[in-house]
Image (cartoon, helix red, strand yellow):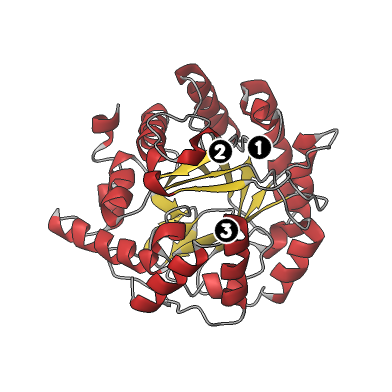
């Protein structure tokens, strides 16, 4: 982290977290945020679900909910970028305040509730940015809070925005929309994913479909998710979203309702990841996300079974320079352990987490 980034982060931490995030997006729109550009080495270049990645370190959904700064984010060092979540209709989300820093824990609690400007606004921005991108860009699909058929909402967003992105994620794991997580049940999930895949087949191009799951599933629930995912043949699973757990926290805001992300999520999400890798016998492509704040933690996710990883919450504490730090640090760790390519390390440490 350079001096300018340190000063900027310190200033942003003096204001309300949600306002700070909006200020960061505005600065990025204005082009005043230093960006790393493309980061790659022979060890880090990888193919994931048919997509060519410069490196396996991606941006998780939530940072750019409305696809406002896609061009900048694709130049920030990430190997792939996910925007959203986007719902069919615009919605304000939950009442403010709804974002809380837990500085002592290097964590964040949010209860945004899928606040976004809707799929038409996202599609308009993605269309303007639909020229060739340096890295793949995906969209997190969401459902409106007041929808009578939430499963259909995911398909609607894909039908509108799918032609404009490189992959799409079905997000049934946010804890901030009432009963959304009920869609992770086997029967409901099978029907939902089948509907989304049917829409995918009408897009005129193959768009990989990912499923993002919660870290709070029981072993039986996780096994059911894995079985359905393999049965319907989705392309990848993202493990995991935020947690409702609050174990071991110290910060004053630890009792706030919402999903917890950041450092305290690392162990729980990595155990879910390793278990998924075991359940699918390493055949299902996996995205490891939750609590990554260093190259070593990204490496642990990969060794637990992740083919690629995603960041978000740690950026609030360490800035965008963290992307380059993790990618190049990961390359060093792979070299240290004698791996010629990142794919060679996938799952090599899985048993440590089971």
Mark 2 residue element: strand
Distance in Å between CA atoms under marks 2 and 3: 15 Å
Mark 1 near mark 2, Cβ–Cβ under 8 Å? yes
- Label for residue 85? none
The answer to whether residue 328 is seen in the rendering is yes
Q: Quadrant of residue 219?
A: top left
Q: Split into 4 quadrants, where in the image is the N terminus?
A: bottom left
Mark 1 or mark 3: which comes first in sequence? 3
Q: Residues within 10 Å of mark 2 (few under 14, many from 20)?
A: many
Instruction: Kindly check if marks 1 and 3 are in contact, taking CB atoms under 8 A apart as contact.
Output: no
The front one of 339 and 255 is 255
Q: How many numbered marks have been drawn onto this rendered protein structure? A: 3
Please, what secondary structure does the residue beneath circle 1 have? loop
Q: Nearer the viewer, residue 34 or 161?
A: 34
- Residue with the most extreme bottom position: 31
- Which residue lies under the disc numbered 2? 259
Are the residues at dot 2 and dot 3 in contact (C-beta closer than 8 Å)? Answer: no
Please report the residue visible at 75 percent of the width from the left and 44 percent of the height from the top: 155
Marks 1/3: CA–CA distance: 16 Å
Quadrant showing the C terminus = top left
Residue 239, visible in the rendered structure: no
State which quadrant residue 330 falls in.
bottom left
What residue appears at the point 71 percent right and 31 percent down from the top-left corner? 178
Q: Which disc is residue 176 wearing?
A: 1
Task: Left or right? Give the position of 265 relative to 210.
Answer: left
- Within 10 Å of disc 1 (Cα), the crowding (few <14, some 14-19, many 20+) is many
Q: Most extreme residue toward the top, as rendered?
A: 220
Residue 274 x %, y %? 35, 33
Residue at numbered disc 3: 63
Q: Secondary structure at mark 3?
A: loop
């Amino acid at each position: 982290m350079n001096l300018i980034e340190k000063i900027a982060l310190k200033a942003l931490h003096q204001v309300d977290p949600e306002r700070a995030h909006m200020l960061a997006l505005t600065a990025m729109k204005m082009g005043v945020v230093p960006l790393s550009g493309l980061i790659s080495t022979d060890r880090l270049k990888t193919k994931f679900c048919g997509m060519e990645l410069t490196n396996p370190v991606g941006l998780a959904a939530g940072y750019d909910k409305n696809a406002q700064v896609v061009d900048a984010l694709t130049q920030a060092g990430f190997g792939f970028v996910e925007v959203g979540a986007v719902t069919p209709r615009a919605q304000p989300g939950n009442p403010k305040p709804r974002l809380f820093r837990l500085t002592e824990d290097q964590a964040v609690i949010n209860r945004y509730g899928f606040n976004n400007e809707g799929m038409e606004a996202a599609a308009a921005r993605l269309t303007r940015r639909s020229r060739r991108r340096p890295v793949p860009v995906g969209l997190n699909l969401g459902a409106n809070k007041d929808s009578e058929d939430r499963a259909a909402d995911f398909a609607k967003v894909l039908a509108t925005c799918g032609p404009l992105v490189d992959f799409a994620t079905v997000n049934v794991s946010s804890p901030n929309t009432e009963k959304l997580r009920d869609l992770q049940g086997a029967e409901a999930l099978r029907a939902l994913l089948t509907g989304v895949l049917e829409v995918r087949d009408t897009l005129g191009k193959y768009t990989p479909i990912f499923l993002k799951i919660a870290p709070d599933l029981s072993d039986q629930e996780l096994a059911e998710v894995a079985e359905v995912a393999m049965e319907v043949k989705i392309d990848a699973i993202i493990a995991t979203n935020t947690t409702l757990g609050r174990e071991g926290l110290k910060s004053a805001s630890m009792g706030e309702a919402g999903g917890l992300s950041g450092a305290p999520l690392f162990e729980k999400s990595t155990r879910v990841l390793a278990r998924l890798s075991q359940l699918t016998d390493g055949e299902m492509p996996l995205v490891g996300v939750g609590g990554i704040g260093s190259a070593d933690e990204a490496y642990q996710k990969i060794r637990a079974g992740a083919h690629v990883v995603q960041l978000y919450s740690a950026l609030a504490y360490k800035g965008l320079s963290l992307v380059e730090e993790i990618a190049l640090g990961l390359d060093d760790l792979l070299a240290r352990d004698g791996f010629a390519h990142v794919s060679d390390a996938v799952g090599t440490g899985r048993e440590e987490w089971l």
